[in-house]
Image (cartoon, helix red, strand yellow):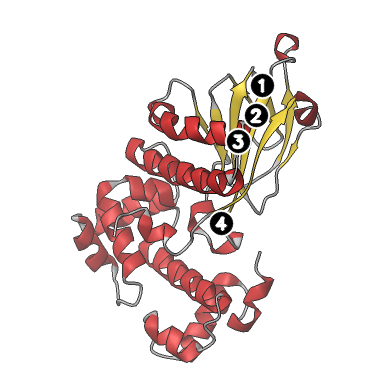
Amino acid sequence: MDRLSSVLNAFRPKTSSVDCLRLDELSRGLLLSAEFSYWVYVVSGDVTLCSKKNGDIQLQEGDGVWLATGQTLDVWVTPEHQEKVSVLLCEYDFGTKALNPLLDLEWQWVLVSHDDVIAQQLAPLNTLLLEESLQPRCGSQAVVERLAEAYLVQMLRLFLQTQKIQSGLLAGLSDARLARAIVEIHEQPQQAWQVASLANKAGMSRSVFSGAFKTTMGMTPMAYLTLWRMRLAAQRIKHGDKNIAMLSDQLGYQSEAAFRRTFKKVLGVAPGAISSLH
């Protein structure tokens, strides 16, 4: 399995909505829910997005910004662009936010400029997405939703290839050596992995691997292994798997009691209370 699919197979995003917003809608600002992720793309004109968390970011026509989690944004438009400003807003649902490792990101947004190699490679899909969004035809809603999901996956793939992200899971998967160990964790969470065995998969010494992993991922290899196991467990429970004893065995725990203790410690709730996670 490839490095991105090892995550998306477990935590697959779905398109919640795709909207083309004009100036009158943008003048009220963008209230973007923290429970979703967003792609904001300037179809025409120039705009400035203002965030209390991240300051201001200026976007020209053809620029876009990826927000791992939503926030409240003010939108400023220069007078000369007021007649032609429009923005494409794609909203993505990754499921329960606390479970999805793609949302464990210190950064709040990633700029993709119109002259960036990422934008150039996204251009064919971008053209299709805009055509279907701006000129709806029979079946356009279904087409737009699938195109938006394909667009997101392609964008994440290009983030990995260009090492666009500097910390978190996407950064770890961007590193060829760390990615080998991370994918092993994703594919075989039941294995009794140790730092030494993961370092061997990465082709690195134990000490170099441990340092690089923590610097890039923000946690130790063993902490990430535990977190991945608990998130997989929570995901399966949410989807109807209620046999906790079997689940704990499948994820490498020798006893159900140890699994339950770890689950509560890592996720903050007992397996039976998983519906309370947001």
Amino acid at circle 4: Phe
- Residue beneath label 3, please? 133
158 and 203: which is toward the camera: 158
Mark sitting on residue 47: 1
Tell me which residue sits at (39%, 54%) in the image: 214
> SS at mark 3?
helix
Image location of residue 255, percent across then percent down: 43, 91
C-alpha span from label 4 to label 1:
27 Å
User: What residue is pinned by disc 4?
Assistant: 94
Given the image, on which type of amino acid does mark 2 rest? Val
Q: CA separation, marks 1 and 2?
A: 9 Å
Q: Label 2 to label 4, Cα distance in Å? A: 22 Å
Q: Residues within 10 Å of mark 1 (few under 14, many from 20)?
A: many
Compared with 50, 253 (above or below) is below
User: Of marks 4 and 1, which one's residue comes earlier in the chain?
Assistant: 1
Whether pointer 4 and pointer 3 mark residues with C-beta atoms closer than 8 Å, the reply is no
The residue drawn where x is 36% and y is 50% is 172
* Residue 117 against residue 12 in the figure, above or below: above
Q: Residue 228 in the image: x percent, y percent?
A: 44, 67
- Circle 2 packing at 10 Å, graded few (<14), some (14-19), many (20+), is many
